Structure formats: C-alpha cells, structure tokens
Image (spheres, rainbow, N blue to C red):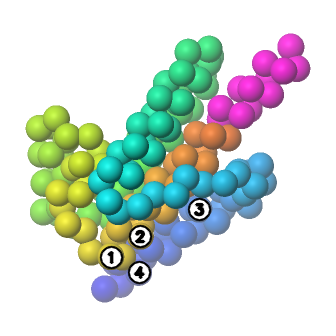
Amino acid sequence: MAIHLTKRLSVFAAILSIVLFMPGIALAVPVQLHITSGVIFAQITKTATYSTLSEINLTPLQRQELQAVRQRRNREIEAVLNTSQRAQFNHNLRAGNNMNQALEKLHLQPEQQDFVKAIFQFTHLKMKAISSRHSLKLLHK
C-alpha cells in the first residue's frame, strides 16, 4: 500500500513541479480523454497527427525533446501497472495494438485509469509547450 502511495505522490509531485517551473504550460487547455475507446483513439490520433506534422520542421534537438517526453510517458504508465499488467501491456503492444488499445485490454482499476489519464494530459501539455516554443522561434525569425 505504501508503494502505491509513493507512486501517486511522485506522479503528482512531477506534475506540480513541471507546472510551477513552466508557467506557459499551466495556461494550456488539456485534451479531455474519456475511457470509451472510440473517443480516446480519435483524440490520440488527432494529437499524433498534429505532433507528426509539427515535427517536420523541428530541429534534431526539439525532436529529441519530444522523444524524451514520449519515453517518460511510457515509463510513467508502466509504473502505474503491476507486474502482470506490465507483461500483458507489452504483449498487447507487440501484437500490434496502439497504446490506448493495449491499455483498454488490461481492464485497469479506476485509480489506475485516473493516473493514466493524468499522464496523457501531462504529456500532451509538455508536447504542446515544445511545439509552441518552436512556433515562437519561427515567428521571431
């Protein structure tokens, strides 16, 4: 039980620290994710398309930043899962499912769903901040 509390506190501490140290992110509006697969898939597809299109003109450093954000998201999601869920999640991904499909097949507990939702929202905000910094740099040229 103490481990779960520690995980929760670390996730919330990370979110709080990023929001405090990057005030521009705090003003961004997060994507509303819902548990129904059609809605999640549509929203993530929209975000993925946006990030792919915006990555075309990014510098290698900015691409590395986005990749680091995605890798951190993956580690944070795996930290929410227990050992058997983690193994099943990796199996689902290798079987060709996208991240949302793989997560839905796990039938997560409500608190796990909340954590995953927060991780996705936080990741979206970080990626949006990286993209907006890139847009601002283009405007100043």
Front of the two marks 1 and 3: 1
| Mark 1 residue type | Pro
Compared across the picture, whether 102 is left or right of 91 comes to right
Q: Label 3: which residue?
A: 15
Q: Secondary structure at mark 4?
A: helix
Q: Is residue 84 above or below residue 51?
A: below
Q: Label 4: which residue?
A: 5
Residue at image coords 20%, 40%: 97
Q: Label 2: which residue?
A: 114
Q: Mark 2, residues whose alpha carbon is within 10 Å: few (<14), some, or many (≥20)?
A: few
Q: Earlier in the sequence, mark 3 or mark 2?
A: 3
Q: Is residue 71 above or below residue 33?
A: above
Closer to us: 96 or 40: 40
Q: How many marks?
A: 4
Q: CA distance from mark 4 to mark 3?
A: 15 Å
Q: Residue furthest right?
A: 140
| Mark 2 residue type | Asp
User: Residue 8's x, y, as percent?
Assistant: 44, 74
Q: CA distance from mark 1 to mark 3?
A: 20 Å
Q: CA distance from mark 3 to mark 2?
A: 14 Å
Q: Earlier in the sequence, mark 1 or mark 3?
A: 3
State the extent of the magenta-drawn residues as a range.
130-141
Q: CA distance from mark 1 to mark 4?
A: 15 Å
Residue at image coords 61%, 18%: 58
Q: Earlier in the sequence, mark 1 or mark 4?
A: 4
Q: Are the residues tagged 4 and 2 within 8 Å (C-beta)?
A: no
